[in-house]
Image (spheres, rainbow, N blue to C red):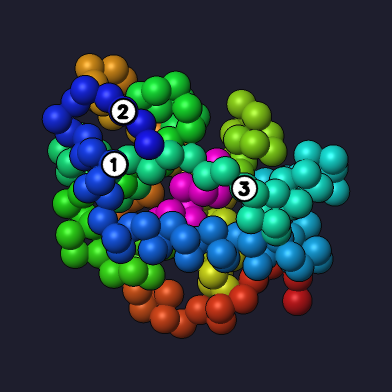
C-alpha cells in the first residue's frame, strides 16, 4: 500500500473490509478466467489485441496459479477523485502501479459494484503488463470488466477517452478512470456469470 503524506489518502488500516473482499473476489475471477485457455486467449485478443505470445503465457500462469501481484489499492476522498469511481495509474504516489477508489462512492456502493470497478482497473493493469506504454484503444478496462463478468460492453468503450488528471500529494497524476454510469447494477444482475466474447457466436 502506498505510504504518502496527504490528507486525501486513507491509511492502509482504513481500507474497508468490503474493498478487501471485493479485491479477493476480483482476483479469484481473474484466476478462474486464466484457467480456461480458450476463454483467456479469446478475451486477451478481443480487449487487448494480444495473441498467444510468451508475455501472454507468462501472465496466464501468474493469474491461474494465484501468483499475480495486483497494484496497490489506495482510497482517496471524492474531491480528489474528481468524480471518478476508480482509476488506475502506472506510477502512483510511490512510483508503482496503483488503483485509486473514491471514498465517497464506496460509502454507498454494493459489493458487485466495487468488484466491477476493481476489475475495470485491473484490466488497465493487465493492458500495461501486456502492451507496455502502448495503451489499447478506447476504455479497455471497462470492456474487460464487462466481458469477464458475462456482459456485453457498450459500443462507446471502443473509442472513448477514459483518461483524466487528479492531484495527489501536490502532484498531477494521469489515471484511466471508471466514470459514473459505467457500472449498472441492473446490468450486473443480468450477466451470464461467464466470459462473453462479442466477436464469437
Which mark sits nearer the N-terminus, 3 or 2? 2
Q: Is residue 119 magenta?
A: yes
**Image spot of residue 194 (x, y percent):** 62, 76
**Image spot of residue 185 (x, y percent):** 35, 74
User: In terms of depth relative to the viewer, which is nearer, 60 or 78?
Assistant: 60
For the question of whether residue 151 can be seen, the reply is yes
**Where does label 1 land, which residue?**
12
Q: Which mark is residue 68?
A: 3
Residue drawn at x 78%, y 57% as measured from the top left: 41
Residue drawn at x 33%, y 57% as measured from the top left: 19
**Image spot of residue 170 (x, y percent):** 22, 17
Q: CA distance from mark 3 to mark 2?
A: 22 Å
Magenta-highlighted residues: 116-125
**Where does label 2 land, which residue?**
3
Main SS of residues in magenta: helix
Which mark sits nearer the N-terminus, 1 or 3? 1
Q: Which mark is residue 150?
A: none
Whether pointer 1 and pointer 2 mark residues with C-beta atoms closer than 8 Å, the reply is yes
Q: CA distance from mark 1 to mark 2?
A: 8 Å
**Image spot of residue 144 (x, y percent):** 57, 56
Q: Is residue 139 above or below residue 114?
A: above
Amino acid at each position: 500500500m502506498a505510504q504518502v503524506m496527504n490528507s486525501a489518502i486513507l491509511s492502509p488500516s482504513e481500507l474497508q473490509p468490503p474493498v478487501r473482499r471485493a479485491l479477493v473476489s476480483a482476483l479469484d475471477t481473474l484466476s478462474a478466467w486464466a484457467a480456461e485457455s480458450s476463454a483467456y486467449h479469446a478475451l486477451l485478443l478481443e480487449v487487448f489485441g494480444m495473441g498467444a505470445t510468451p508475455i501472454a503465457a507468462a501472465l496466464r500462469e501468474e493469474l491461474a496459479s494465484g501468483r499475480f501481484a495486483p497494484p496497490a489499492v489506495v482510497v482517496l476522498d471524492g474531491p480528489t477523485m474528481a468524480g471518478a469511481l476508480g482509476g488506475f495509474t502506472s506510477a502512483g504516489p510511490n512510483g508503482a502501479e496503483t488503483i485509486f477508489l473514491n471514498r465517497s462512492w464506496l460509502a454507498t456502493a454494493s459489493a458487485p459494484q466495487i468488484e466491477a470497478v476493481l476489475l475495470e482497473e485491473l484490466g488497465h493493469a493487465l493492458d500495461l503488463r501486456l502492451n507496455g506504454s502502448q495503451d489499447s484503444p478506447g476504455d479497455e478496462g471497462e470492456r474487460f470488466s464487462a466481458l469477464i463478468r458475462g456482459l456485453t460492453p457498450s459500443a462507446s468503450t471502443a473509442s472513448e477517452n477514459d483518461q483524466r488528471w487528479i492531484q495527489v500529494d501536490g502532484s498531477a497524476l494521469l489515471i484511466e478512470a471508471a466514470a459514473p454510469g459505467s457500472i449498472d447494477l441492473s446490468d450486473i444482475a443480468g450477466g451470464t456469470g461467464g466470459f462473453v466474447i462479442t466477436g464469437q457466436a
